Amino acid sequence: MNKKNIAVIFGGQSSEHDISCISVCNVLDNIDTDEWNPVLIGITKEGKWLLVDSIESIKNGSWTESKTSAEISPDATKKHVIVSDDKGTREIRLDCAFPVLHGKYGEDGTIQGLFELMQLPYVGCGVIASAAGMDKFYTKIIVDTIGVRQAKFVGVRSYELKDIEAVVRRAEAALGYPMFVKPSQAGSSCGVSKVKDASELKDALKKAAEYDSKILIEEFIKGREIECGVFGGGFKKVQASGVGEILAAADFYDYDAKYNNPDSKTVIDPDLKEETVEGIRDDARNIFNALDGYGLARVDFFVKDDGEIVFNEINTMPGFTAISMYPMLWENKGISKKELVKMLIDNALERGIH
């Protein structure tokens, strides 16, 4: 059997570059290499696209020293990556793409648009779902239309910070303290702050503006942090996994608590009432469908002490690291990482056919 070529793309220019480099190793470890020949394409933090020769070079970080460029062409008649080095230029035809990219320029619809132009099947959500899911402010606008409970919010453009006192007054009137401040399009909790007074709010707004020109200020929800995985979409019924709970070793599950603090823990099948679990699974499917999701996503919620379910956010290319909730939730349902990767690639090919 002739093996097909799958472009596995990682790294990227977002604040989640390093997490992508970890995720991709787990994806590569679970691709069926009897069927697929992975074409590894790394994107440096500066935005240079490189052909990478091995998973070992990703693990030790030496992949950024590659002298071989790899530029994916938007030409739909060729569906190829153009590879160039000191030996010349050649083309590698592609049959599929797996963008293991988190955050801006990878999870926000931009690279998905490239795949659409070249008519190449790819893993994950399409342009609209990726763009809306990445932008927390617009996600909340969409979710408001389907009757799912979510935290109250105020949207701010960075230019409004010229009159930061007016922004503070508006947030205080709508939400009250404490509140959360988030860049609208940053992931892995980058640039997120919990604030309890006007001084902290001002500092948090300036910090968030370093990551994005749109800022989301949210009502503080006191509750357990619960996550649910979804798979499917389009012509395939959306499936929801069970749920998992985040036990953050910090005031909230920020970047450091998530990736650097060993005291943070994840619990699969936490102690929740059955109707609460089913409510979360229903909301996760409904939110995914409302965004026109396809392939995969992880949907995050709070569960308050009284059992009320509150939507937090959606991640359309969730992490695939050793501590990432998405693959663990499906493993708990009896689907191994290898089976999950195959399901995701097969799902991509199904969309490419129709």
Image (spheres, grey):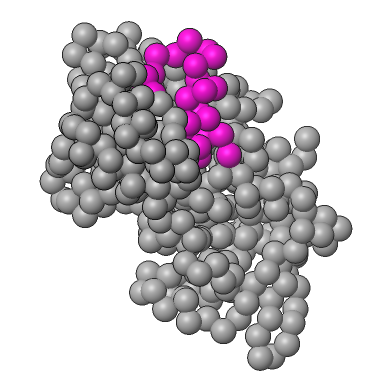
Q: Residue 56, image x and y in percent?
A: 41, 73
Q: Residue 3, image x and y in percent?
A: 68, 61
- Of all residues, the one furthest to the bottom in this rendering is 86
> Residue at position x 77%, y 53% from top?
118
In the displayed structure, would residue 192 be above or below residue 7? above
In the displayed structure, would residue 58 be above or below residue 161? below
Q: Is 22 positioned to the left or the right of 268 in the image?
A: right
In which quadrant will I find the C terminus? top right
> Residue at position x 57%, y 59% from top?
8
Q: Residue 173, image x and y in percent?
A: 31, 19
Q: Determine if residue 165 is in view.
A: yes
| Quadrant of the rendered image containing residue 29 | bottom left
Prevailing secondary structure of the magenta residues: helix
**How many circles with numbers are drawn on the protein?**
0
In which quadrant will I find the N terminus? bottom right
Residue 143 belongs to the span the image colors magenta = yes
Q: Is 338 positioned to the left or the right of 82 in the image?
A: left
Q: Is 125 positioned to the left or the right of 224 in the image?
A: right
> Residue at position x 47%, y 25% from top?
140
* Front-most of residues 157 and 280: 157
Residue 53 belongs to the span the image colors magenta = no
Q: Residue 122, image x and y in percent?
A: 65, 48
Q: Which residues are magenta?
A: 131-153
Q: Determine if residue 184 is in view.
A: no
Q: Is 155 positioned to the left or the right of 234 in the image?
A: left
> Residue at position x 69%, y 48% from top?
113
In the displayed structure, would residue 109 be above or below residue 64? above
* Front-most of residues 182 and 229: 182
